[in-house]
Amino acid sequence: MCDLKGCGTQTDLPPIQLDSQQRRLFLQGLACLPLATVLSYPELAKAAAAKTEEVSITLEMDNKVNASLALPAADKAPAVILIHEWWGLNDQIKAVAAELANLGYVALAVDLYAGKVAKTPEEAKTLMGDLDPEIAKETMVGWVDYLKKHERANGKVATLGWCFGGGWSLNTSIAAPVDATIIYYGNVAKGAEDLKTLKGPVQGHFGKLDKNINQAMVSGFEQAMEQAGKKDSLTVYWYEADHAFANPTGARYDEANAKLAWERTTEFLKKNLAG
């Protein structure tokens, strides 16, 4: 079952096949594999996640919050802040951060659940329901500031999130204007006044079969962006797919559409964070 911010199960793996030799070489750091393949296998995702390091900041209200940081080879690079699904900051999201670092970005996967990671939809729903939106907002603003000032970053920042994190990708860019915003099937029910602080372009990825993050919601978002004077900064892509179609560990994973969405994502980042 899906709601506005969460969806599905993590128990049904897609039909991605990997032989033992490929797995062994990857774990030894001797081979590269497609991101979707890495995310599909827990031990591979864990190995990729191990390439990140834990960092922390302290908020104004004296709360310490953590994130996982992956650094590129370059001395200076643009940054991407990743916001997890309703499951929490798991190895899959950390592995995506590692992949973005391989692509040349300072990648920071934030933790909005204080280290808790759900294993069932019921646990995920509880964690999401327990989230204090004001603390989450302060957390995200703090991390954007952290990235803009990081010694390895060049000052440019993009937000990227999926599902629950897709909504928070937009929330973050509203609260702390950044250079680009990417939303994967996240809650975009915003009014024009909410959107006026957005700075950079926005890219959205949505599934036509999604019954909650649906055409009506996204159309309302498009109208609100136009009313806010930001029509030309929004690009929306629709896929013949369901909610969470880009998650290789979920039952609704769609390999072809996930691949296309990721290609569009990386091109968008390259275009808007270059220079």
Image (cartoon, rainbow, N blue to C red):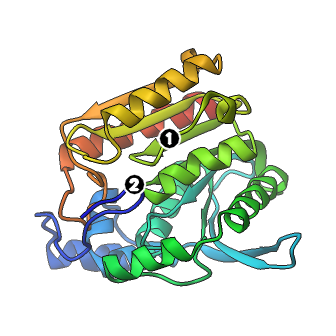
- Res. 83 mark: none
Residue 28 location, x and y as percent? 38, 79
List the residue tagged with mark 1. Answer: 189
The structure residue drawn at horizontal position 68% and vertical position 76%, both measured from the top left corner, is 66
- Nearer-the-camera pick, 180 or 131: 131
List the residue tagged with mark 2. Answer: 4
Q: Amino acid at mark 2?
A: Leu
Residue 267 location, x and y as percent? 47, 32
CA–CA distance in space, label 2 to label 1: 10 Å
Is residue 230 visible in the rendered structure shown here?
A: yes
Q: Quadrant of residue 110?
A: bottom right
The structure residue drawn at horizontal position 65% and vertical position 72%, both measured from the top left corner, is 67
Q: Is residue 154 above or below residue 30?
A: above
Which element is circle 2 on? loop
Which image quarter holds the C terminus?
top right
Residue 129 location, x and y as percent? 51, 72
Q: Is residue 25 above or below residue 159?
A: below
Which image quarter holds the N terminus?
bottom left
